[in-house]
Image: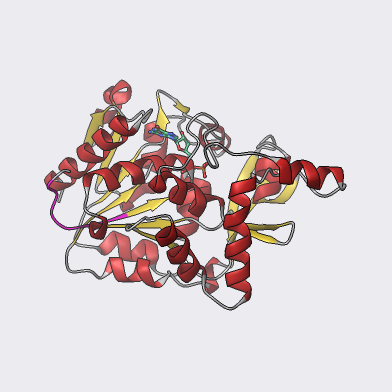
Amino acid sequence: MSGFAGHVLALAGGVGGAKLIRGLALQLAPAQLTAAVNTADDFNYLGLDICPDLDSVTYALAGLNDEKRGWGLRDETWRFMAAVERLGGESWFSLGDQDLATHVLRTARLREGASLTEVTGELTRALGISVCVAPMCDQPVRTLVDTGEGQLAFQHYFVARRCEPVVQAFHYRGAQAAQVSTPLADALVRPDLAVVVICPSNPFISIDPMLALPGLRARLEHLPVPVIAVSPIVGGDAIKGPAAKMLRELGLPVSAAGIAQHYGPLLDGYVIDRSDARLAGSLAPLPVHATNTLMRNDGDRADLAGAVLRFAEHVI
Ligand code: GDP
């Protein structure tokens, strides 16, 4: 435990974000942390409401995630998917047998009229998680990707087309009509809010959909507490996923500096990898802290979270 005083609001996408959320949870009391999670890559599949980023964060906090595969649950089996294939059903997105329970229960509760915030609370509590995990909003927001091949729905671009088409722009359909979820709105007005952490997630497909919600970006910019991002780019490349490719295709520097340039005046502080320390000068006057940002295990995750919290205490 870090001894950090105050509340932490963390914004996260899936796997990269989930690692730092887990680190923060190891450093803070559960009541000190709100994890607001991207829902713009949610989709309906086989009649089920799938929320990949919420599930990644939930499974990581519960310690049930599969570290080797990088997504989904540990000790997973795949008999449901094999049966779907045998019956000639859609099978481009793999749902594990245990994971299926999450999607079935969530879909049933949503059909009954519960909000995604309520369902997420129920599922996380059932797994013994006391940290508040909140969807960014309760209304559907969907990422659309403008590419050289036309506009593609996010999962089509990401899974079916394996991020191959060149990206030109992103749209977050529904964002303007959505509202930040109640737990996210509550965290923003807490008198003890001490820092907002933008996790090392993909800025274009995990963080920007949140910033597109009405008023959120302006609220964050005017908060009297620091907004600190952790770079998802280490040594000129992404640890996983298309973040580096997207930076290149959008004409931004393929480095931690490109991410800072993209977030612009939103950031009050920036944590980059030690191997990128030489970039700090070029980022001035943005306060920069260089440390190990590769999170291979819980020790790394807790260390990085501790470093972010200590840095936050020195950034106004
Ligand atoms: P996704 O929804 O699963 O793609 O997950 P996110 O949007 O949360 O994160 C993807 C980003 O996380 C990628 O750009 C990765 O480079 C970054 N990432 C993954 N693991 C790590 C890590 O251990 N350290 C850092 N700094 N970034 C990471």
Q: Can residue 287 be seen from the camera position used here? A: no
Based on the picture, tell me whether residue 7 belongs to the magenta stretch.
Answer: yes
Rendered residue at 36%/66% (across/down): 184
**Relative depth, front residue between 68 and 74:** 74
Decide which of 104, 158 is in the foreground and name it.
104
In the rendered image, the quadrant that contains the N terminus is top left
Image spot of residue 160 (x, y percent): 73, 41
Residue 12 is inside the magenta segment: no
Query: Residue 252 appears at what percent x and percent y?
Result: 48, 36
Q: Quadrant of ligand 1?
A: top left
Q: Which quadrant holds residue 124?
A: bottom left
Q: Looking at the image, is 203 positioned above or below residue 75?
A: below
Query: What's the residue at 17%, 69% (across, down)?
Result: 191
Give the residue displayed 36% in from the left and 28% down from the top. 294
Height in image: 28 above or below 221?
above
Residue 38 drawn above or below residue 140: above
Image position of 309 (left or right of 122): left
Number of residue marks = 0
From which residue to which does the magenta span run?
Answer: 3-9
